[in-house]
Image (tube, coloured by chain):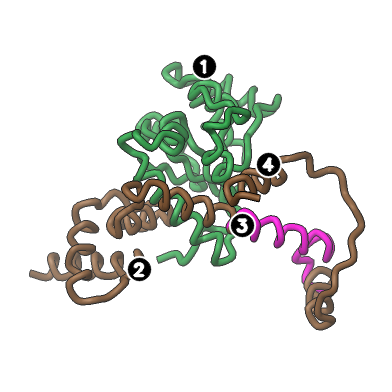
Chain colours: A brown, B green
Amino acid sequence: MQKTVVLDRIAQLLRADQSQTVNTSMRIPVALRDAASIATDELKMAQSTTVLTVEALRQQLRSLLMRASLDEHYDNHPESRPTLAELAQAEADLSNHHLKNQDELIARASHDILQVMQHPTPTDVLIWAESLRFYQVQL
Amino acid sequence: MKSKLLPETLLVLDNEAIQALSDRSHSKHRRMLAIVERFQSHLQRGSQATVTVPTTVRVEASINRQDPATSFVNRIVNNDHSLDSKTADQAANLRRQYPYLSVADAHIAAIAVVDKRDIVIITSDTEDFEECLSGQNVNIIRI
């Protein structure tokens, strides 16, 4: 099957009616099963180990689907890949960081950090931007 | 800084946000992808946040999930928020109080009021939402 068809099918199944269930046998490590059992029985971290397993699987599939879809999108449309500054701004906005809406400062930090560091992350840019702001206030 | 979105966070997209995501010629397409990128990295680190689009927003934005052209959006936004009775009542109250809210925007605002999770709203109408929502659980992001 083509990758794009596979991704669409996964998306469709994740959106589908989830009320129908099926028994399945899965070979998992005994220690992992026991840890899950203690987490649910003693710490009430989930309703049951089944719920814990299903939710973890669902989350993982959603994350993988999103990653694969973004990568495919960039392969087909490279111009749509966000810049480091755009990613750092998005990180600040999503986290309600105090650099939220500070586009100019983040763009400057992104430009500067690329002069001295290879493959900085959006979080690195935010730390750099905070540092820039700190020294601006001091001077 | 917070290392990740709170586990139960719900990310809600407004009309322009979903349009920007679905249309790669939209001026804010890359901005929207940057948000999705960071959201995905939070998921990868164990956050159980969810991204959703209210059904009324889909109507306003003319997004039909059965349309093959919406394939990319369907993969990213894997969840509709349907307008149930409780949310509809809240949305009606909000529209009475803030008449400038469209039906879709009232639906979004009502989700933020009714839902107990932390809410992140991605919108081009930040002022409108800031005026009608004062809850501590809401983070309003300009697309």
Q: Amino acid at mark 4?
A: Gln
Characterize the magenta stretch by its predominant secondary structure: helix
Q: Is residue A129 magenta?
A: no
Q: Are marks 1 and 2 on the same chain?
A: no
State the mark number for residue B96: 1
Q: Disc 2 versus disc 3: distance between alpha carbons?
A: 22 Å
Q: Amino acid at mark 1?
A: Arg
Kindly indicate whether the residue at mark 2 contacts the one at mark 1 (C-beta within 8 angstroms): no
Residue B88 sits above or below residue B130 on the image: above
Q: Chain of mark 4?
A: A
Q: Are marks 2 and 4 on the same chain?
A: yes
Return the x and y of residue B142 as percentages of the image width and height.
36, 40
Mark 4, residue position: A12
Q: Are marks 2 and 3 on the same chain?
A: no
Secondary element type, mark 3? loop
Q: Is residue A46 magenta?
A: yes
Return the x and y of residue B117 as percentages of the image width and height.
60, 48
Of tags 1 and 4, which is closer to the observer?
4
Q: Are marks 1 and 3 on the same chain?
A: yes
User: In the image, A59: left or right of B133?
Assistant: right
Mark 3, residue position: B48
Secondary element type, mark 4? helix
Q: Nearer the viewer, residue B34 or B111?
A: B34
Residue B18 sits above or below residue B9 on the image: above
- Residue at horizontal 66 percent and vertical 30 percent from the top: B82
Residue A84 sits above or below residue B30 on the image: below
Give the class, few, some or many, for how many residues have Cα within 10 Å of label 1's Cα (few <14, many ≥20): few
Q: Chain of mark 3?
A: B
Q: Disc 1 versus disc 2: distance between alpha carbons?
A: 45 Å
